[in-house]
Image (spheres, grey):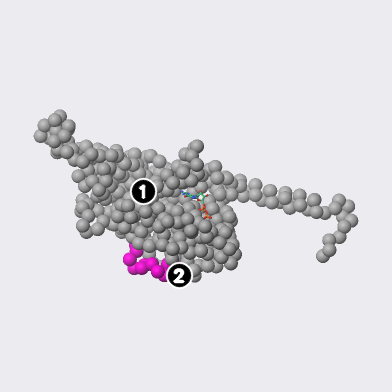
Amino acid sequence: MKLAMIGFGQAGGKIVDKFLEYDARTGSGIVQSAIAVNTAKADLLGLENIPEENRVLIGQARVKGHGVGADNELGAEIAEEDIDEIQGAIDSIPVHEIDAFLIVAGLGGGTGSGGSPVLAKHLKRIYTEPVYGLGILPGGDEGGIYTLNAARSFQTFVREVDNLLVFDNDAWRKTGESVEGGYEEINDEIVRRFGVLFGAGEISADDNVAESVVDSSEIINTLEGGGVSTVGYDAEAVEEYDSGGLLSRFKGGDDDDMETANTTNRITSLVRKAALGRLTLPCEIEGSESALLVVSGPPNHLNRKGIERGRKWLEEQTGSMEVRGGDYPLDEPSVAAAVLLSGVHNVPRIKELQQVAIEAQENIDEIQQESEENLEALVEDDEDELDPLF
Ligand code: GDP
C-alpha cells in the first residue's frame, strides 16, 4: 500500500529515513512521500534520504531551532501554532495516489510526542484517507519524564488516529549496547516488520502473481476497527526448490507431495512463532478484534494451504472472526510470516507504563513544591526585616 509518511521529532524522522532506504533496497514502493518535521535543526540536518525540501523546521520563533527538550506540552503548542508550515509540505503530496497517512514518532520525547496527535487531528479534519500512527514507547531505563510523556501522548494519539501501531523500545532493548547502536538494530526491526506488512498490498503487475494476494484494502479493513495494533514476525531461511535433492532420495517419486507438506508445515509453524514470539508491543493476542497474516518468500515456497491453516489457527487463538491472510512473493532466500493484530486490549505493558507515569507525575509535583518552599526559605530573611525593592 502507498503511504505518505511523516516523521515527527528525531526518532520519527530517523525511522522514516530508514523506510526510504528499505524501499530503495527492496523495491517495495510503500513510501509515496516522506516528510520530516522537527523543532531541532540539527536533527533535520542529520537525515540522509528525506529530500531537503520535505524537511520542515517548526517553532523557530519559540525555540530557535534548538528543540523543545522533553517538553511535550510545548511540542504540542508549537505544532498547533505552525500547522500551516507542516501543511505547506503536505500540499506537495499527491494525496490521490496514497492509501493512507502514517505519522511516526517516539512518544517519550517532546516534539514528536506532543506534535503527532496535533497533526493527526489536523489531517483527519482535512483528508478522507485513513491516518495511522506508529508510536514508539520509551525504554524503561529512560526515566520517569519519558514514561510520563509517553503515557500522556499515547492516550491522546490513540484518540486522534484511525489506528495506532505500537513499537515498544523496552521489549527490544539489549543490555550492554550503546544507545545509538541499539537503535540502529531496533530501527531495522521496525522497518522490516512494517515494511513486509505494508509492502504486501503493493504488488505490481510484473511481479510473480501471488496465489492469494493481500490488497491494500485488506490492510485498511484490518485496521478499520481502530485502537491499538501490534505486529509479530518470524522468518526461516530456505534453499531454492530442488526436486532432485536429498528429499527425493528418501521419498522416491513422492517428492512433490513431500515438498508441499514441508511448505505447508513451515508456514504454519512460522505463523505460530510470529504470533507467540516477541511482538512489537507485547500483549495477549486473545481478544484481538481483527488480524492480518502475510506470508512472504519465493513463490515456490508459498502455498494456499499453509496460509489457510495459519489463518485458521489465528482465528482460534485470537477468538476473532475477522482474520485475513494472503501471500507476498518476494525474491529472497527466506520465508517469513508477519501477523498484524489489531484492536488488542490485554496489554500489561501499557498499564505498567501508566502506573510509572502517575508516580513520576506525583514525584515531579512534590519536587516542584519542595523547591518553591526551599527557594522561599533561602530568599526571605528569617525575621522578615528586609523589604524587596518592588
Ligand atoms: P523528539 O525529537 O523531541 O520528538 O524526541 P526523540 O524522538 O529524540 O525521542 C523520543 C523517544 O524516542 C526517546 O525517548 C526514545 O525512547 C525514542 N527514540 C529516540 N531515537 C530513537 C530511534 O532512533 N529509534 C527508536 N526506536 N526509538 C528512538
The answer to whether the residue bearing label 1 lies less than 8 angstroms from the nearest atom of ligand 1 is no
Q: Single out the residue that lies furthest toward the top.
A: 250
| Mark 1 residue type | Arg
Instruction: Assign the C terminus to one quadrant of the image.
Output: bottom right
165, 82: nearer the viewer: 82
Q: Is residue 180 visible?
A: yes
Q: Position of residue 323 (x, y in %)?
A: 31, 49
Q: Position of residue 90 (x, y in %)?
A: 42, 67
Q: Which mark is residue 229?
A: none
The residue at the point 31 percent across, 44 percent down is 337
Q: Which mark is residue 192?
A: 1
386, 342: nearer the viewer: 386
126, 236: nearer the viewer: 236
Give the mark nearest the N terminus, 1 or 2: 2
| Mark 2 residue type | Gly
Which residue bears the numbered disc 2? 88
Q: Which residues are magenta?
A: 87-99
The residue at the point 36 percent across, 68 percent down is 94
Spatial distance from mark 1 to mark 2, Cα to Cα? Answer: 30 Å
Question: Does 219 lie within the magenta span?
Answer: no
Numbered disc 2: secondary structure: helix
